[in-house]
Image (cartoon, grey):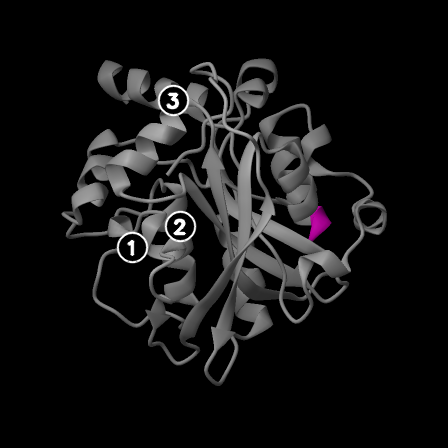
Amino acid sequence: MNIFQKITFFMYCVMAGAHSYAAQNGSIEDISLSSHRKAVSIPPSTAQDQEEYLHLQKQMILDEELQFWGVGLFKSQDIFGKGICTLTGSNWSHVGAVLMGKSGTCYSYESTGDPEQLLEKGILPQVQIQPFLDVVENYKGNVAKRQFIFKKDKPDPTTVKHYVLENLGKPYEKDLTHLIKAIHGMNTVEDNTSVFCSEEVARFMRALKIRNDNNSSENFVPRHFGDIISQPVFDGDCGGCLGEIEILKEIKEKNACCFGCCTLL
């Protein structure tokens, strides 16, 4: 990694700090915060380093059967989040996949990061999975959920879980040019060595046969999952459309500092 890439990556590490998601056959409101926390005895957030962080995430879902429920949408209140919304023409600055476990626990699967984890524990921005309600509670911004309405078949839970386990720990996007090109839909190939948030959701949906289009996953931005004018349609074998946006948390807008809690694309 050259000097420019290191500086760019450090910028994104400092900017990182958002999260997302929801559930499958039930709704988020069906799960109380107290029972949700009991289900996760050792949350990944308690990890002291990168190795432990990855281990605790895998342990958390070890006995779970996971299903794709939909997406979580986030709007950061800081200058970076507002910039992302403006540049991408979106009401949202971050997106992640929402998974529901057979146990009734819902999870947030996303590519993101936390400045405190980076500086205090050396945990870099990456693809990760967290209890969804923890993510919602800790997020300093607006949060919504959007359930996916399957037209027929749902993805195989084994495929869902395998994909998650295979991709946990994948680095957040290191190449600034990919992010810039995504805004204009100019990425022509897919580089999966590092991923930004909306790219990873799009990749995940393709792997689950929800998507069956020729567009590069690197051209997806939060707008593609948070369009309120129409219901985004996906035509894969397990295709369907995203339903209504339901607001879970709304924060009164205020002047936020640059390093408050920025969400990555």
Image height of 260 relative to 127, above or below: above
Q: Mark 1 near mark 2, Cβ–Cβ under 8 Å?
A: yes
The part of the image, by quadrant, that contains residue 23 is: bottom right
Amino acid type of the residue that numbered disc 1 sits on in the rendered structure:
Ser
The numbered mark, 1 or 2, whose residue comes first in the sequence reads 2
Helix, strand or loop at mark 1: helix
Q: Judge the density around disc 2: few (<14), some (14-19), many (≥20) Cα neighbours within 10 Å.
A: many
Measuring from the top left, give residue 190's x and y in whole percent. 24, 51
The residue sitting at 65% across, 44% down in the picture is: 57
> Which amino acid, mark 2?
Glu
Residue designated by label 2: 200
Tell me where residue 118 appears, x and y as whole percent: 53, 20
Tag 3 residue: 79
Query: What x and y, as percent, mark residue 110?
Result: 50, 45
Q: Spatial distance from mark 3 to mark 2, Cα to Cα? A: 23 Å
Residue 226's place in the image compared with 158, above or below, is above
Q: Which residues are magenta?
A: 59-63
User: Quadrant location of the N terminus?
Assistant: top left
